[in-house]
Image (cartoon, rainbow, N blue to C red):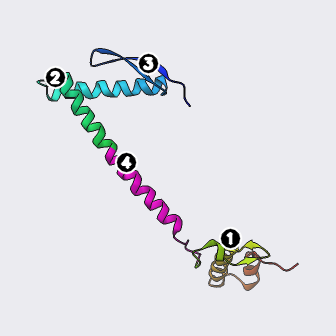
Amino acid sequence: MDKKRRFKAKIAGKDYTIVGSLSATQLNTVVDLVNQQIEQLTELAPELTNADRCVLMAVNAISDQLTKEKRIVELEEEIAKLKNEPGPDSNVKDSRSRPTLNGRSTKGMIAESNQQTQTTASLENSNQPSQGRMEQVEFPFRRK
């Protein structure tokens, strides 16, 4: 549990004491932003009282918060969906049913094998002499 601190701030010309666990740096940033927004509202609508400006700021802040929370939920759902999709080299969705070799998952081996197959195919299509082709390819499976 974070220790509560008392922080003195001047917002719109009035002194306030804020109690919370945020750092002084973060609270200074918040107070600076609040004062900037109040100044902007004063320039845009000088006929409003400070109370009206503060209400408008609160409405804007809550609106921004809801918009950001909605975006966070969308991104979390997208991440969850991406985590549940199989990768480009995988034909198996459930990791428990993946093939194994001596108790080890072959997932990485399959990816390496596919990569090696592509490398071998590209070398076979090149104009290199046949002797040089096999020296450049390393296969993940070797007999002992």
What residue is shown at x 67% (from left), y 73% (from top)?
A: 107
Classify residue 31 as left or right of residue 117: left
Classify residue 124 as left or right of residue 3: right
For marks 1 and 4, the one nearer the N-term is: 4
Classify residue 115 as left or right of residue 13: right
**Which amino acid is tagged 1?**
Gly
Front-most of 19 and 109? 19
For marks 4 and 2, the one nearer the N-term is: 2
**Which label number is shown at residue 7?**
3
Label 2 – label 1 distance at C-alpha: 65 Å
Q: Quadrant of the N terminus?
A: top right
**Which amino acid is tagged 2?**
Thr
Q: How many marks?
A: 4
User: What residue span does the magenta drawing correspond to?
Assistant: 66-90
Residue of label 1: 108
**Which label number is shown at residue 69?**
4
Label 2 – label 3 distance at C-alpha: 25 Å
Residue of label 2: 49
- By secondary structure, the bulk of the magenta-drawn segment is best described as helix
What residue is shown at x 82% (from left), y 78% (from top)?
A: 142
* Nearer mark to the viewer, of 1 and 4: 4
Q: Where is residue 26 drawn, in percent x and y?
A: 45, 28
Q: Where is residue 134 drawn, in percent x and y?
A: 75, 80
**Which label number is shown at residue 67?**
none
**Which amino acid is tagged 3?**
Phe
